[in-house]
Image: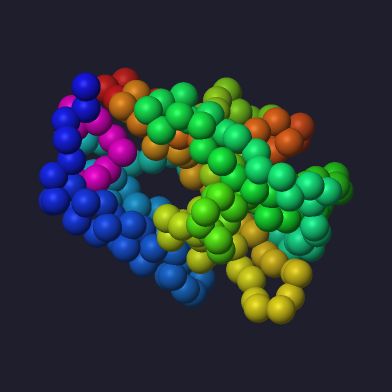
Amino acid sequence: MEAARQPQDYLDLADWRRRVGDLYRLSGPEALPKFRKARDELFRTHPQSPLSIRSRPSFAGLDYFEPDPSFRIHCHVEPTPSGDAIEIDTGGEDGVIRYRRAGRLRFSVSGNTCQLTVFSLVGYRGGLFLPFRDATSGRETYGGGRYLFDTAKNTDGLALELGAGSPEVVIDFNYAYNPSCAYDARWACPLAPRENWLTLPVRAGEKVFSQSEA
């Protein structure tokens, strides 16, 4: 059984989310390399790192695809056919988490028309979450898929550019990242439902984590 959380655990978690959010507010032409370097440092040193404690001393950094400007994509947000709740199983003690379909992104990758559903956590209005799988999942990237953004956890900024009153947004797959369960078995995460499985490869963002000590 997992040990009861102490006040310090909650403080550390709040600090982790704040620091991660700061990374997504970087700007300028060097934002992506600075983001990756600082994220590695957080993983290596922060008490709320998703890495197992035993793997941190030998952690040499996360593995990423080379930056690719073509994966910074302009999208149109469309209404979804159904606003009904969808249940996504975490596979852990959190059980099933209920989301609503907030909208659908339609965009093009290498001449192929794609779409991904953006979800909003039921009871948390305004939070937007985008998990996805693609043709690299299970080989070059984590088999359960990756996340592009989760505004409730401050992992959006650079990955999702939007403006009030406009259905046009910009997404950047160079900031796609693994869920915590990719690094250590103690974590359980909501993974991409089938409607967010892309048939083409998205070779951008974070690759599979393969450190043997994890």
- Image vertical order of residue 103 relative to residue 59, above or below: below
Instruction: Using the image as rendered, state which of residue 94 and residue 107 is in the foreground.
Output: 94
**Residue drawn where x is 75% and y is 69% of the image:** 168
> Percent x, y for residue 112?
85, 45
What number of labels is visible?
0
Quadrant where the C terminus sits is top left
- Taking the magenta stretch, the answer to whether it contains residue 30 is no
- Taking the magenta stretch, the answer to whether it contains residue 51 is yes
Whether residue 14 is visible here, answered yes or no, is yes
Residue 117 relative to residue 5: left or right: right
**Residue drawn where x is 13% and y is 51% of the image:** 8
Whether residue 140 is visible here, answered yes or no, is no
**Residue drawn where x is 51% and y is 66% of the image:** 157
Residue 117 relative to residue 10: left or right: right
The quadrant in which residue 33 appears is bottom left
> Percent x, y for residue 72?
66, 59
Residue 214 relative to residue 56: left or right: right
Please name the colour scheme applied to the rendered image.
rainbow
> Percent x, y for residue 94?
41, 33
Main secondary structure along the magenta-highlighted residues: loop
The quadrant in which residue 17 appears is bottom left
Quadrant where the N terminus sits is top left
Instruction: Using the image as rendered, state which of residue 160 and residue 44 is in the foreground.
Output: 160
> Percent x, y for residue 154?
43, 60
Magenta residue span: 47-54
**Residue drawn where x is 55% and y is 25% of the image:** 143
